[in-house]
Amino acid sequence: MKVLVVCEGKHESGGALESLLRRLGPQPSMQFDWDKLSKRSLHAHHGKGQGYYKRAVEWILEAEKKGYDGLILLVDRDSEPLRQTEIDRAQEDEISAIRRALGVAVEMFDAWMLADERALTEVLGVEVSKQPDPETIADPKNECEDLLRWSERAMTPTQMYADVARMADLGILEARCPRGFRPFAERVRSLCSQAS
């Protein structure tokens, strides 16, 4: 199964999101190709709906045009509640039959890295206490950077995210990020199960 994965930032595409995807849908035959949400060469989809709905539909049509079997798209909510509605609408849109798993990280992907303190402790090599509810942290990127500064291990934020994503307990992640990670994980599992 050949899947186009579209996301916003370098931390997602730098290994962390791929680790999560491979753990959620362990299909050895799955091939992921990556692209950035902000790619300017796509043509705007005209019709009803706002920015993120239209952008998601653009990517649905692009994936179909290029012969992909599926599309995975992840955006940050960034304190914009309508993004969830727009992405959910695109998930259900019948403009194309292409399989898809569209998701919104609340408030951003970085929050998912704060859900499992055991994984953080293992990756950073320092004792990390349970963090506040990840989906309510105002600036999870800054929280991750602060935790990384405490570590004696030399690593980039991208490497930290990739390692945490590889080790985090997915059950904990779903429980602590129920508005963002849980529905996204369910959609990814559904998409991947269609590949078997």
Image: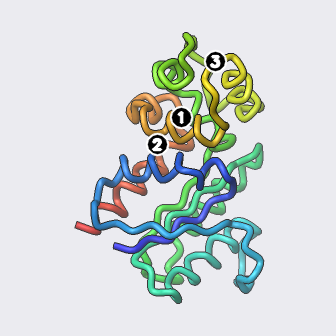
Gap between marks 1 and 2 measured at Cα: 6 Å
Residue 196: horizontal and vertical position, in percent?
A: 22, 66
* Mark 1 vs 2: CB contact within 8 A: yes
**Structural distance between the alpha carbons of marks 3 and 2:** 32 Å
Mark 3 Cα-neighbour bin, 10 Å: few <14, some 14–19, many ≥20: few
Q: Which mark is residue 182?
A: 2
Q: Residues within 10 Å of mark 1 (few under 14, many from 20)?
A: many
Residue kind at label 3, given as amino acid type: Glu
- Badge 3 marks a residue whose secondary structure is loop
The residue labelled by disc 3 is 152
With 56 as the anchor, is 191 left or right in this view? left
Q: What residue appears at the point 37 percent right and 63 percent down from the top-left corner?
A: 191
Viewer-nearest residue: 101 or 142: 142
Residue at far left of view? 196
Observer-side mark, 3 or 1, equals: 3
Where on the picture, by quarter, is residue 61? bottom right
Residue type marked 1: Cys
Q: Is residue 18 above or below residue 131?
A: below
- Up the image or down, 73 lies above or below 3; here it is above
Mark sitting earlier along the chain (3/2): 3
Callout 2: 10 Å neighbours few (<14), some, many (20+)? Answer: some
Q: Is residue 46 left or right of residue 101?
A: right
What residue lies at 50% left-to-right and 36% top-to-bottom?
163
Outermost residue, front side: 154
| The N terminus, quarter of image | bottom left
Whole-percent x, y for residue 47 in the image? 72, 83
Labelled pair 3, 1 in contact (Cβ < 8 Å): no
* Displayed quadrant of residue 75: bottom right
Please tell me how many numbered marks the rendered image carries: 3
- Three-letter residue code for mark 2: Arg
Circle 1 residue: 177
Q: Are marks 3 and 2 in contact (CB under 8 Å)?
A: no
